[in-house]
Amino acid sequence: MDMVAKVHVSTLDCHRLLPTGNVFRPLIGRRRVVVQPCRSFKSEDVGPAEYVKVNKFVGAIRSAVWSCSKPSLRTENKLREAMEMLEERLFSLALYVGRYIITMMSTGVVMFVGFQLSGGDSQMNELIWYSWLGGIIIGTMIGSNLVLDEVARAGPRNVLITGSTRGLGKALAREFLLSGDRVIVTSRSPVSVGLTIEELEENLKQALNAATGSARKKLAHAKVVGIACDVSDPVDVKKLGKFAADELGYIDIWVNNAGTNKGFRPLLEFTNNDIQEIVSTNLIGSILCTKEAIQIMETQNKGGHVFNMDGAGSGGSSTPLTAVYGSTKCGLRQLQSSLLKECKRSKVGVHTASPGMVLTDLLLSGSTIQNRQMFNIICEHPETVARTLVPRMRVVKGSGRAINYLTPPRILIALVTAWLRRGRWFDDQVTYYI
């Protein structure tokens, strides 16, 4: 009888296999790919010699890897590890290809049935084609997001976030931490830093208690530390860089999130101290921190990535009632353009992140009734924004990337569903619902 074989991915690895009856049993428990006869075609007259012949294909692959491998791999343990990695990747590739084929065949069957039911109606056939195309596009978008999320969960990264004891900064820190990263939080107030660390550690503890398997293993690397820092003070910024190097060893991602706007009002109603604080925090602080981050990352083998936060005025548009804030954000966009050329051959990436309109103290301070009613349509909670930004920040490559939350499709959806969003955060009396 001809032998029918199947590929079996064992949960056990082995140095070699010994025949026992009609199967080859592993001696040592580790993962590897083994070709075994299909159970439906087993018979008593098929012995171990036939099984050895079936496994010649796997043996040929192993021989090819051995002949092409580096001399440093030519030991039994290292070769086995390389083969394990190769086998796992081939298996994953085959799995994805198989899913794709099954999906396309299923959609083909659905289309065929639809054409049969349409009775040759050309308009109905066009509708079926467009529905199929739309489904493929939407499915591809969903699939790519799932893959991105899976890749983004790999880690851990070492992350530093300024202005991270409240609002969006704290939400970003929490999301990075729950992705298994090591995070440094900072603000001017030592008390705020301490309270934020306690809160985030409690969040991490709860996540660990709820996690199992690989998710728990990923969170085992996460930790949060912090230090007080005034980003407008060069001495403090230098201390922050040293603290990060001492605590984490290196920095993968540095996020310049510290910022203030001192409310919504005409320029003449701002005090000189207000103007100095806005400019020194938003613009000077971001410049000093960017400089420190680049200096540190230039010395690292893998470089790193620096993010400056976009805001109202970044594109050069007018920002009445927040003229000072808008001018600092426009200045940061100019800084970004300049650094892209200065760091063209650098291993440090400089990027922007745009959270859109986020329900934080920074946005709500001094806002009018009309402002807040509009916030119902376009604003989101910091946690919602962070869940979108962080996975993309973790896997960013190159330089000059713009990671935006409020994309044109999101704006369009918000406008189309505006009537459903009335009273979402604020009622007609501007009462805020958390």
Image (cartoon, rainbow, N blue to C red):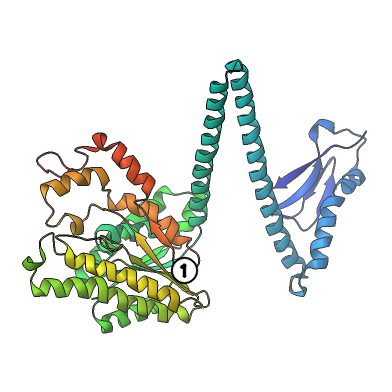
Residues packed near mark 1 inside 10 Å, few (<14), some (14 to 19) or many (20 plus)? many
| Mark count | 1
Residue 275 position in % (x across, y down): 14, 72
The answer to whether residue 283 is above or below residue 100 is below
Residue sticking out furthest to the front: 122
Residue sticking out furthest to the bottom: 235
Quadrant of the image occupied by residue 191: bottom left
Q: Give the residue type that dot 1 points to.
A: Ser
Q: Quadrant of the N terminus?
A: top right
Which residue lies at the image location 16% right of the left edge and 73% below the top edge? Answer: 277
Query: In this image, 17 relative to 9: left or right?
Result: right
Which element carries disc 1, helix, strand or loop? Answer: loop
Residue 269 position in % (x across, y down): 6, 66
Give the residue at mark 1.
399
The answer to whether residue 257 is above or below residue 249 is above
Return the residue nearer the eye: 342 or 219. Answer: 342
Which residue lies at the image location 36% right of the left edge and 79% below the top edge? Answer: 291
Q: Quadrant of the C terminus?
A: top left
Return the residue nearer the eye: 36 or 356. Answer: 356
The answer to whether residue 239 is above or below residue 112 is below
Which residue lies at the image location 63% right of the left edge and 18% below the top edge? Answer: 116
Could you tell me if residue 29 is visible in this image? no
Query: In this image, 391 relative to 239: left or right?
Result: right
Could you tell me if residue 138 is visible in this image? yes
Which residue lies at the image location 66% right of the left edge and 49% below the top edge? Answer: 93
Residue 179 position in % (x across, y down): 43, 57
